[in-house]
Amino acid sequence: MSKQCLLSCFLFFCFFIPQLSFSCPQDQRQSLLEFKNLLIHNIKDNYTAFEELGTWRPNSDCCKWLRVTCNASSPSKEVIDLNLFLLIPPGLVSSSILRPILRINSLVGLDVSFNNIQGEIPGDAFVNLTSLISLDMCCNRFNGSIPHELFSLTNLQRLDLSRNVIGGTLSGDIKELKNLQELILDENLIGGAIPPEIGSLVELLTLTLRQNMFNSSIPSSVSRLTKLKTIDLQNNFLSSKIPDDIGNLVNLSTLSLSMNKLSGGIPSSIHNLKNLETLQLENNNGLSGEIPAAWLFGLQKLKVLRLEGNNKLQWNNNGYVFPQFKLTHLSLRSCGLEGNIPDWLKNQTTLVYLDLSINRLEGRFPKWLADLKIRNITLSDNRLTGSLPPNLFQRPSLYYLVLSRNNFSGQIPDTIGESQVMVLMLSENNFSGSVPKSITKIPFLKLLDLSKNRLSGEFPRFRPESYLEWLDISSNEFSGDVPAYFGGSTSMLLMSQNNFSGEFPQNFRNLSYLIRLDLHDNKISGTVASLISQLSSSVEVLSLRNNSLKGSIPEGISNLTSLKVLDLSENNLDGYLPSSLGNLTCMIKSPEPSAMTIRPYFSSYTDIPNIERLIEIESEDIFSLVVNWKNSKQVLFDRNFYLYTLLDLSKNKLHGEIPTSLGNLKSLKVLNLSNNEFSGLIPQSFGDLEKVESLDLSHNNLTGEIPKTLSKLSELNTLDLRNNKLKGRIPESPQLDRLNNPNIYANNSGICGMQIQVPCFPTQTKQPAEEKEEEDKEEEETIFSWNAAAIGCSCGFLIAVVFMSYNELWK
């Protein structure tokens, strides 16, 4: 054989054979490149994704590309797995971008989770993926319904469509997926009944349909799924009883049915579930009866037990229990517990979460409870008394301590500075004395609520590096200067109803993330301008009601572009209103959800179930706001707070004309300018306050007529114009006609209208031009009458003289 022939053979084996054996199929490489090109076209301004797709090059082996797995045991080296998890950067892309990769019919696994894909799932493109075993499309923006083509993928073992916006219903065709082991449809909008055909999925290990809109009852066919280990049907609209034969699922480790409308008692068959580790039945309106502690506490593997909330389940306070489990999480909130905190908790040494709130527990905080290594202790809304044991704060494992609305007393222990607590809520007790300065040493304290106690003295200064974000010390007896020494991340300061005095310190300018500042009902003096010049544009709520502030409102108020609530009422403010008040952006545009939410900051603590919900419930008072709304003090709560915008400048000494620019505040709900010294006309522009519900201009010196433009205010239901100098006809409209209480218009100079049953006579309703014309006419008539009188007198005199002369001659 010649050297040339040998060389040719060598080249053939070195180059041609490897290309046949170790390269993915050409058509599959082409599909992947097409997907890449579509992705580049859709997100051309963001190159984050392209770094990982840099290995996806033409004329290269796609089996070596990142996120691509080929079948190494197959001669054709076809692509069998695509891991595209978290590939697409922020910015929505259409679901059609998936079509090229759905042509790769050798796929066994496909993961496109945690991307920004929107639109309907392209069901027709899945028809040929008959080898698919695992499909993960979680955490996108897929909508529409689940395509029926997915039910033809009979080899499918895992289907995850959770955390999308998929609607429709779950078809009975789900029964075709005979090999399915995991069905995960959490956090969508799927409704209707859970199909009874789901009982055909006998290989199923995990069934999670949490946070959808499923209704009707739990199908009894579920009891045939004897391999099931997890059932999570939380947060739906399921009703009726828990199936009695739920106890047939002997392999079950997790049963979560909370936040539904289930009724009846806890089925006794659950005691057959010897492998049960998690039982969550909280917040079902109809669950009732006695908590079956006798057998429930005999489930030796149980770790999580949650029976709390809006149930009617009741604890038997006369029974004796001896738990055979070691719990990590226990919640018996609102379950009728009475007497002392149960002694059997002493042996629950693995407990990390304890919620016994809203019961009738009495006595002191036990020392043995303070010694347990619990991360979360919630005992709010009970009748507990006495002082807190110092050792409670001397262990590093305590992260959440919620003891609000009890009868605890005494001083807060000095040892509080030794703790690692992140959330500390001691509101509505009888704590007294000063707050230990050591509290500022707690390294990761984020939320501190000491409101509604009898604490006094100066409030401690926090260090600039403090993590404190929410502070509520309202309704105490604190005194001294206004506290302003906090960390840069502080977003909420509620310090109302204390005895703070003096002028505003300069440290507020360091709080660049401040969202809410509430200092109403104190004794603060100085000018409001000195504070406003320091505040960040992030401030949404500023309440300084009932202090001793003086000076005028500065033009710079318009720099607070996020302001939704401004309450400066009951002070000594004077001067003119700045026209810049009409430029407050968030009182002009439609309201959006507020940044004042606690949930995102605690979402990472997943080892404590429902911790976000717990903090949301317990902190409702913190996020509430007391305002003067429709002539009475009302409370606005966090759940709908963002809907409300308010401007209250009442009970000051403001004067001059009301700026017409206030008519720009189209989203304003409440406008109160009463009890000032305003003069001039009511601005015609007030007719543009299209969202206003309450308008109070009473007790001023306003003159002229009520603008007819007010007839456009279709949402107005509270109006007060008393004690002014208004006159003329009250405008008519369907809304104004309903405001027919005479007190609305009392003590004005000449108001009439059908709303107050005072008729308007012609002289009361003439327009200014008509009145002038009338006056000119009367003046002309007066002049004419006096001229006639003068001429008449002269003529009469001459006639008399002539007559007398003639009479003398005749004689």
Image: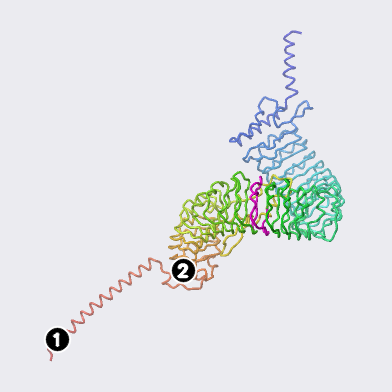
In-front residue for pair 89/472: 472
- Residue 630 got which mark? none
* For residue 546, side relative to residue 123 (left or right): left
SS type, badge 1: helix
Residues under numbered marks 2 and 1 in contact, where contact means CB atoms less than 8 Å apart:
no
Residue 753 visible in image: yes
Q: Position of residue 451 (x, y in %)?
A: 64, 57
Kindly identify the amino acid type of the residue bearing the numbered disc 1.
Answer: Ser
Q: How is the image coloured?
A: rainbow
Foreground residue, 168 or 141? Answer: 141
State whether residue 211 appears in this view.
no
- Amino acid tagged 2: Arg
Give how far across and how far down residue 647 sits, in percent.
53, 58
Q: Nearer the viewer, residue 454 or 165?
A: 454
Q: How many neighbours does mark 2 have within 10 angstroms: few (below 14), some (14-19), or many (20 or more)?
A: many
- Whether residue 186 sits left or right of residue 325 in the image: it is left
Is label 2 or label 1 in front? Answer: 2
Which residue range is magenta in the image? 425-451
Location of residue 397 in the rendering, given as x and y in whole percent from the top left corner: 73, 46
Q: CA separation, marks 2 and 1? A: 64 Å
Residue 447 counted in the magenta span:
yes
Mark 2 lies on a secondary structure that is strand
How many dots with numbers?
2
Residue ID for mark 1: 805
| The image quarter in which residue 669 lies | bottom right
In the rendered view, tell whether residue 142 sits above or below residue 357: above
Q: Looking at the image, which is closer to me, 39 or 364?
A: 364
Q: Which label number is shown at residue 729? A: 2
